[in-house]
Amino acid sequence: MTLLEIILVLTLMCVLGSMAYITVMRPMASQRLDTAADQIRAEWLRARNRAMSRGVTYAFRCSQESGVYTVEPYDDASDNAGWTGSFGGTNSPGNAISAAIQGQLPDQITVHDGTILADELASADFAESGLAAEGFGTQGSWTILFFPDGTATSAVITLRNEYGRAVDVSLRGLTGAVLVGEAYPTGTVTAGTAASDGASAAGGVP
């Protein structure tokens, strides 16, 4: 075999390897996106159950373009040592409540966007507290509250993978119901992925 023939064979092998890599990685990325949506749904349901069983408002917090989130008892009074009454529960040194729980979404899955429906803040106690609802969904970060009466702040969180595929996870505040929508393309991919994906990025994602 001549040197030219060897180079041609190696080039062909690289092209075929890249195609095989894309074929394998795209379905895996879609699976991780589905797993992340199920993870968020489970965390919301657990936060609601904790709030109802312990009589304490819980907060789910996440930030844009991050795969990290926290679930913790909510303190409405600027980190005061204790508060009572406002949200149907008590958070004080004498009331044992678990510390904040930090979670991580699957690799390459991030929170792409979110919406807090301030006009649907469910708890009557919260509505009467005088707190600014706008503070729960601004500047690329979101706080979703789960109240002891079983209601929550209505919200929609959008998760995205490295190939620009996204899915919406929505929370109905009045009932606590969580709905995971169908995946859809956003047209935006991670920089490193775009380079390896090549022209095929414009095609559909499984």
Image (tube, grey):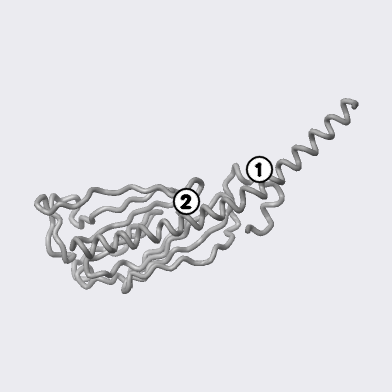
Q: Is residue 184 above or below residue 29?
A: below
Of helix, strand and loop, which one carries label 1? helix
Q: Residue at x 44, y 59 (%)?
A: 38
Question: Residue 53: which quarter of the image?
Answer: bottom left
Query: Is the residue marked by circle 1 packed among few (<14), some (14-19), or many (20+) residues within 10 Å?
Result: some
Q: Residues within 10 Å of mark 2 (few under 14, many from 20)?
A: many
In the image shown, does 54 or 58 lie closer to the viewer? 54
Mark 2 residue type: Thr
User: Is 173 located above or below residue 9 in the figure?
Assistant: below
C-alpha gap between disc 1 and disc 2: 20 Å
User: Residue 96: where, in percent of width, then height?
Assistant: 15, 52
Q: Pinpoint residue 71: horizontal percent, then vertical percent.
A: 30, 53
Image coordinates of residue 126 in percent, x first then y, are 22, 67
Determine whether the residue tagged by mark 2 lies in a helix, strand or loop: strand
Residue lying at 72% horizontally and 41% vertically, measured from the top left? 17
Residue shown at 75% from the left, 37% from the top: 14
87, above or below 161, in the image? below
Say if mark 1 contacts mark 2, CB within 8 Å: no
Q: Residue at x 29, y 70 (%)?
A: 121
Q: Where does the image place residue 83, in percent across and percent down from the top left?
A: 13, 57
Q: Quadrant of the N terminus?
A: top right
Q: Which residue is mark 2?
A: 110
Label annotation for residue 196: 1
